[in-house]
Each structure stands twice: as C-alpha cells, then as structure tokens.
Image (tube, coloured by chain):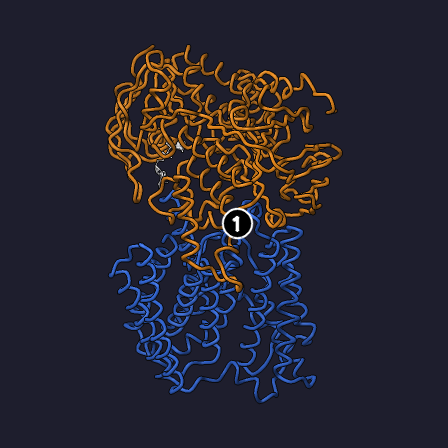
Amino acid sequence: MKSFFRTHATLTALVVLTAALSFLSEAFFTPRNLSNITLQVTIIGIIAVGMTLVILLGGIDLSVGSIVGLASIVVTLFMQSGWNVWLAILATILTVGVGIGVWNGVWIAHYRIPAFIITLGMMTIARGAALVLSDGSSIPVTDPVFPLLGGEYIAPASSAVILGLALALFLFATLRTASRQRSCGVSVGARDIALRASFGVAILALAAYVFIGYRGIPYPVAFLIALILAGAFMLSNTRLGRRIYATGGNREAARLSGINVFRVELTVYVIVTTLAAVSGILLTSRLNGANPNLGNMFELDAIASVIIGGTSPMGGVGTIGGTVVGSVLIGVMNNGMSLLGVSSFYQLIIKGFIIIVAVWFDVMNKRRKA
Amino acid sequence: MGDVVLRMEHITRDFPGVRALDDVTLEARAGEVLILAGENGAGKSTLMKVLSGVWPASSFSGRILIRGEERRFASTHDAEAAGVAIIHQELNLIQDMSVGENIFLDRYFMRSFGIIDWDRVHMEAAKILERLRIGGIGTRDLVRTLSVGKQQMVEIAKALSLSASILVLDEPTSALTDREADDLFRILRALREQGVCMIYISHKLDEFERIGDRVQVLRDGKAVGDAEALSSVSLDRIIARMVNRDIREKYPKEPFAPGEVTLEVRNFEVDHPLLRNVKKVSGVSFDARKGEILGIAGLMGAGRTELVTGLFGGLPGAARGDVRIDGKPVAIRSPEDAIAAGMALVTEDRKLLGLILDFSIRTNITLSSLKAVSNALGVIDPMKDRGMAERFVTELGVRTPSVEAAANSLSGGNQQKVVIAKWLATESKILILDEPTRGVDVGAKVEIYRLMNDLVRRGVTVIMISSELPEIMGMSDRILVMCEGRLVAELKTAGATKEDVMDYATGNRTQEGFR
Ligand SMILES: Nc1ncnc2c1ncn2[C@@H]1O[C@H](COP(=O)(O)OP(=O)(O)OP(=O)(O)O)[C@@H](O)[C@H]1O
Ligand SMILES: [Mg+2]
C-alpha cells in the first residue's frame, strides 16, 4: 500500500506533465511522437527493470552504461567475423551480459565488497574494453536482419489483435483475483476493482491510439512490455521475488531464515548486466551501427527511473511498476523539454532536481510513517 | 512518596485499524516507581511514546501535564528538555560509535570554536558508568562489540546522563543478567531517593514487588482501574486484570518419556568473531532426545547463542564439530542446510535477526517455508501463503487487525510470536528456541509453553535457551549449563535446585566429567 501510494504520486506527476505538454505543444500528443517516446524509454527501461532488483537489494550497478557500449561493439564484431546474427547475439549476452554479471556478483555477494566500488571499477573496465576492441571508432553493421530487431514494428493489424487480447486477459485476471479474494473472505471494494479496471482500460486505449495510429508496436517496446510483466510477476508471485525483498530488507535475518543470500544477490547482478547487454544490442540495431561510447551515463538514467519510481535506495521496498512510471516520466520530460526548445544543458539540471525532490518526498513519507 | 509530577489525561491514540490507546488517564509521583503492566499490545509502549514525544502532540488526543503545566511535545528533543527520558524496548544505539559518543550523542561537551572535547565526553561517560557500577565496558569501545546486555546498560547510562526527572523504562531487564538487573534496581532505588519519577514496564512479575511502588494495568488500550499500591494488591489480582482470566499454572509442564537421540553434538567449537585463537564455545558435546525439552542455562555471554547459531549454520567458517541427526552425520554449512536437515532456530534478537521489519506478518511467517507454499516453478500460491500465515496468527494469538499489517507495527511481544510462527511453519523435527519468551506477556508465555508441550508430544525435539531460571526449571526435562563457552554441567530438572544451576553457571562449580 505504501509503495502503491508513492507510485501514485509519481503517476499523478506524470499525468499532470502530459496534460501540460499536450497543451503547450501541438506536436506532443500525436501517435508518432508518443510512439517515439516509448522507443526512447525502452532502451533505459530495459536496464531500469534490472536496476530495480539491484536497488531492492540495497545495492547499485554503475557498470550498466559501459556494458551497453561493450555489448554494442562485441555483437558487431561477432557479426563481422561472419557469425550468424542469432549466434552473435547469444554469444554477446553470455560473455558481456552473464559473464560480467557473474564477475560483479561474486565480488559483491561472496567477498562482500561494496557494489558501488566493484561496479564503478567495471564501468571503467567495460568502457575501456569497448574502446580497445573498436579502436575508438564506430563500426557499421552490414547484416540485413540485425537492424530489424530494434527498428521494426509489429504490423498495426496484428498490434490491434494483441492489444485486444491483452484487454480481455486483463479484465479476466482482475475479476478472477477479485472473486478469489472474496471467496477467501478478503473484502475488496467494488470501487477498488472498478478503479483498477478503468485504469487498465485507459492504458490499453492509449496504447491503441499510439501504436495503431503509428506503424504498430515497435519490437523493442514489445520486448520491454513482456519484460515488465515477467519482472513484476517474478517479484510479487515467486520465491525469488520474495527472497529479493527479504534480502534487501534485512540480509542477516533473511540468511538466518534459510535464504541463500549469495545466490539471490548473484542472480540479481547477472540479471541486470544481461539486460544491459540486451539493451545495448537493441540500441545498436536501431542505430544500425556500433559505437564504443554508446550508453554513456545510462546508469544514471536507470537509477533515476528506479528512485523516482519510489524504490527505496536503502533496499527492501519498491516495485517494477513504479520504475516504469519513473522511466516514462523521465522520457516524457526529455521529449517535452526538447519540443519546447529547452536546451539539453538545462534538461540535465532539471532532471537532477527532480531526482532530489523524488528522494526527498520518499524520505518525508517515511518520516511521517515512523 | 512525593507530589504528582506527571498527569496524562484522556489519551487516545489511533493507528490504521487499531485504537492503541483509548481514553487513558494516568498519574505518577515524584520518588516512586510506577509499574505499567499489561498484555502484549495493550498499549504500554505507545503510551510511553506519547509521553516522550516519539509520537508528537498532534498525533493523539488528550493532555500531558508535568507539574501541573500542560506540555505539548513535537519531538523527543522537546520531551528531553522538559526532563522526560525514555529507555526504549528495542535498543537504539548507533552500533558503529563508541560507548561515550552514544551516551552524549548530540550533547557533546565543547571546547571553543565548536570543537568537541572528546576527553571530557569520555571522562563524563566513564563517571556515569562508574556510578552505575558497570564493569567491563570502556567508553571508547564500539557498541557493536558489546553484548546485548551491555548495550542495554549503555542505554540506561545515556538516559541517566540527561538527569531526567521523569524516567521511563520499557522492559529494561529483558536482556540483562540477574546481576546486571540487580545493579539496575540498585540505581533505580537511588534515583527514587533523589525524587525521580519512574515508570517501569515489564513482563517479569517478580520485578513488580522488587522495585515497584504502585501498579497501573492497561488492557486493550484502556486503563483498568486506578493505579494501586503494590503492597495492597496481590500478583494474582494483577494478572487477572491484565489477561481478564485466570492463569492457574505459570509453567504447565507435562511429563514425557524421553525417546531416542535425535541430535548428537561432539566437540563443537565456535571462534571468537574478532580475536584470533580465542573460542566463544569450545569442546561442547551433548545429545538431545525426541520427546524432551532440553534447557540450556547460563549467564548472558556464556556462549549459548553462539553454540546454537553455529549448530544452525549461521556462523559459516567459524563453527566446527561433529553433528549427527538421527544417527547420520550431517554437514551444516548454512541455515539453508540446517532447515533441510530438519532444524529450526528461533533467534534471540527479533528486530535484527528475526524479522524483516518492512514485511507483512504474512510474508514474515512464510519466509522459511516458501517451498511449501509454492509450486515446482517457484510460483507462490497466494491462497496457501495467506492460509499458512493466518493459521499461525490464530494459533499463537498474534494481535493484529490483519496478516497484511507490517511487522514493525506490532508490539514487541507480538513480533516475537511472529518469529516463532515462522519457525513452527517449517515443521522441523528439532526446534531450538533462543530466549523464546523475552518480552512476552504472562498469558502468551503460557501459550508458548503449551505449544512446546504439543510439539514434544508430536515427537519434536525442543531445545530452549533461557536466562530466566524459573522458566528453565519449570519447563525443561534436562538442563545443560554453560559457563564461559564450555559445558559445565548436565542436570535432571527433577532434583536440581536453582542454586545448583546458578552455582554451575557462575563457574563456582563444575560437574565431574566436564572439564
Ligand atoms: N507504528 C504503529 N503502527 C501501527 N500500529 C501500531 C504501531 N505501534 C503500535 N501499534 C499497535 O498499537 C497497539 C499497542 O502497541 P504497544 O506497542 O503499545 O503494545 P505494548 O503494550 O507495548 O506491548 P508489548 O508488551 O508486546 O511490548 C498494538 O496493537 C500495536 O499493533
Ligand atoms: Mg511494548
């Protein structure tokens, strides 16, 4: 409930901002622009989902931005050397994603070196490796299939079918949960259900407006949505999710409760670097070329999304839903400021203040409760 | 006894879903110890948090009068300035600061130019410790390195350093040894002579008569009658008021026939966490049987917690020895292994080691039994999850509006019940309880004892560490006594006396066969 409320506050901010921008700029609330925002949000959003898990553990991963750059170079080099696209992607995910994740995770979870230090080191190492491998310059992609991953769209007609199915599934799930809860004697207000249902319908209607109105659902966006659903389900409905929250909430108590905290932490650090590698591959595909400097400062945007989304920097409290709202807020803000002609220099300053306000809000909220 | 210095009138404090205090009026006088008694969740701590500014004046209704003058505190700072100091139920020290720094936290002695006079801070801190006659604590020691009992003494020293005229003690002795408690009482008596008004919360009934002058009972957030002089009211009457029913037996021990040996421990030892070549536990060997309650007695710091934590795999790398369960050798390297081998450990410190405070009651209870409430893919069945939590909340009588309430919104005793519930849910065949009834009210204690009886009847091996002799004597079949990391005696409860146990525990005697 607590985290729901905070998500709510960010959500309100998002709605207000969207309304204001629609009013201020005609170009803002168009399917084309909104679809672009989703694409921009996606690259950071994929990383932010993993970062949510890391921050839930009370940790941090500063290396994700550099991993985006390294993955970009590595995947293109693999393809240049004549490998099949899928093989190149798989190899990149295993080496750059899983490999670096295991390295980070072992230092952090087994040797108990602060995550800040280990991932700061990896941030430089990975960036350096990307520069060495590419000799410091960008590499073009020649494969005809690869650019489709990040640049193609699911056709509008198929998109419409998918959204329709999603609507049906969503309503069915909402009603089923409500009836199951009621049969268990939990009182769920009809208003609550109606609220949740109309919220979901509104989101899907907006998605329909955007995606059917402009070329359909972009592949990366579809991937992100699947990832969000899987991540949110994992956190709230699986053992691993429960263990992540417990370890972040009180590591010692979690360990004495029989949780293998090493395995939990290792898993999470592997997930986040793997997602960063995937994000790097998608970005390279969209840009149709690799660049060793890709992903510079992405870690900051990912962390900001998580924190603005209400996840406590101390660990133990937060949701992926919050992170999604946080990253969309950042995406809309960036886009809106560009549309309004605010210089990117000022954008940085404004973004910084918003992060501080969000954390301040979080702290005040806690203080009021305590 | 002096004048009324404190009057709390018509105090009402609501939390979401609970009315913690309901129109409570209370008076306390200078130079007395007023005992505040009541079940877990009756509202004792909340009332004292209202008094000491933890809950600001805007969060409750009613008035607080100190020496006839109405005071409205916005923070604990205001309350301290008005001479109200509180020692909380849970320790509130900063673990990585020294004892002296903690005692004078934020009230350091200054030289000119805003430089802290550390020598003076440590000197004054040493004076207070000396006045308390607390040995073995240096003012420059890090709090982290002290035992819970010692930390509690530092808390007390901190409150005394405020030279308060109203001193609240919320279950101060729950982690103290008898000797430390004696010291505390001596200090409280001296403060009483000096006219300090003290409010004392405890679940240890024998303390009421030892230190109290009057007693005020709370039940369900309401004051039950007015405060009465302890000289004119019997303990049984007080208990009856607290729980609103009769408790005939405080220790409902049932006779059991001990069965086969389930746990064999040979030459177990645990390293000191900081010092090389020093052992916290050494050469401990014992057996525990099915169908018995095995008590482990000893003074605070005797190594009992280290022994069981080590057995449970909680001290990887620092504990070793031969352990057999049901005759088969087991290698327990982590709590995960221990649970798989059928062991459960109710830890001593519920806030630091027992609970995830941000978690709900439900998620805390099912935390160690996630496999039982989820499928092969690791997906948790919400109905099973909730069902398990609700079953134990009912069984143990945890007072809460819902299993979804956060663990940190529960009263201390109810938090303890949640920790016990978590381990009962694992259905282990060996259950180790480390100070299971600390901070638990009379009624609930009996419930926990009954539960132990039930478990033993079902064939569970129960091992109980307790620093309360009456509890050890009242509930165990056999008693192991530890002193300074070694096992010094094994006694049959029938035939042993408290004096015997104390003698062994303090190292005055060692039984034959034990080094
Ligand atoms: N921060 C809080 N949020 C919600 N409910 C609370 C909070 N603090 C206390 N309560 C509720 O208020 C009631 C009284 O709690 P309190 O801690 O005062 O009990 P107590 O008499 O001190 O019990 P114990 O002997 O177990 O320490 C309980 O029902 C408890 O759950
Ligand atoms: Mg209390």
Image: B419 above or below A273:
above
**Other residues around mark 1 within 10 Å, as few (<14) / some (14–19) / many (≥20):** many
Residue at the image position 57 percent from the left and 45 percent from the top: A256
Residue B497 lies, in percent from the top left, at 58, 17
Q: Who is closer to the viewer here, A110 or B258?
A: B258
What is the x, y in percent for residue A81?
Answer: 70, 84
| Residue B98 position in % (x across, y down) | 58, 31
In the image, residue B79 above or below residue A209: above
Q: Quadrant of residue B2?
A: top left
Res A202 → quadrant: bottom left
Q: Secondary structure at mark 1?
A: helix
The answer to which quarter of the image holds residue B4 is top left
Which amino acid type corresponds to the residue marked 1 in the rendered image? Ser
- Please indicate, yes or no, whether residue A68 appears anywhere in the rendered image: yes
Q: Is residue A249 left or right of residue A179?
A: right
Residue beneath the point at 32% across and 79% down? A209
Chain in blue in the render = A
Q: What residue is drawn where x is 46% and y is 74%? A: A40
Q: Chain of mark 1?
A: B
Is there any visible trace of residue B154 in the rendered image? no
Pick the residue in front: A167 or B391: B391
**Residue sitting at x 65%, y 42%:** B315
Q: From the viewer's perspective, is B278 left or right of B40?
A: right
Ligand 1: image quarter = top left
B483 sits left or right of A158 in the view = right
Q: Which residue is mark 1?
A: B368
Q: Which chain is painted in orange? A: B
Residue A113 spot, x, y in % from top left: 64, 51
